[in-house]
Amino acid sequence: MRFTLVLAALGLSALAWADSEAGLTWTVPANWKNLGARTMRVATYEAPAATGDKDPAEIAVFYFGQGQGGGVQANIDRWISQFQGTPANPPKPTTQMVSGLKVTTIEHSGTYMSGSMMGPKTPKPGYHLVGVIVEGPKGNVFFRLTGPAKTAAAAKPAFNKMISSIKK
């Protein structure tokens, strides 16, 4: 069962909060807004825009069920295809272990085609994506950070800390 413990509701707004899905828990940075679940997403967060950027970064968390949502490479390919053009040198994923779980990370930059999977797309030049796939005990959990390059760079250390906090 999914749960969210929002410490801010207890008057502890300076603290991070824990979130969970599919047998995993992670700690969400205190300065991110929790935008809740959305269609196909178990959680959506917003990291503040960096100085000079108008858009914040969006952090989306997806879980489709055990054996659902496609494999690691299929999702990497899909994330890269959400940018205009085909990269001459496709980004190479990296892998690491976090709390005994295999974690694959991919990064890509360019003109991001924002919008729903089947709906109209809005080109957003100068965007950066950090995509993470955690191979959890109940299936893959997908974490995706997207935003203007400067904002994504500012949010990346907190995003990485959140990924490092993942536990079974």
Image (tube, helix red, strand yellow):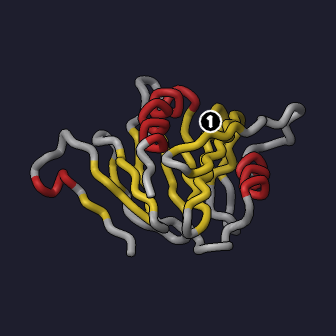
Q: Amino acid at mark 1?
A: His
Residue 165 at what x, y percent from top left?
Answer: 41, 44
Q: Which image quarter is the C terminus in?
A: bottom left
Residue 144 at what x, y percent from top left?
Answer: 57, 49
Q: Residue at x 58, y 30 (%)?
A: 149
User: In this image, 71 relative to 55: left or right?
Assistant: right
Q: Residue at x 46, y 28 (%)?
A: 154
The answer to whether residue 30 is above or below residue 69 is: above
Residue 16 at what x, y percent from top left?
Answer: 27, 44
Question: Quarter-wise, where is residue 146 in the image?
Answer: top right
Q: Which image quarter is the N terminus in?
A: bottom left
Direction front: furthest residue: 100
Sort mark 1 into few (<14), some (14-19) or many (20+) by Cα contacts within 10 Å.
many
Count of numbered marks: 1
The answer to whether residue 73 is above or below residue 49 is: below
Question: Quarter-wise, where is residue 24 in the image?
Answer: bottom left
Residue 20 at what x, y percent from top left?
Answer: 40, 61
Q: Residue at x 19, y 53 (%)?
A: 7
The residue nearer to you, when weighing 73 against 128, is 73
The residue nearer to you, when weighing 21 against 128, is 21
Q: Which residue is mark 1?
A: 128
Q: Residue at x 41, y 41 (%)?
A: 47
Direction right: furthest residue: 88
The residue nearer to you, when weighing 88 against 21, is 21
- Report helix, strand or loop for mark 1: strand
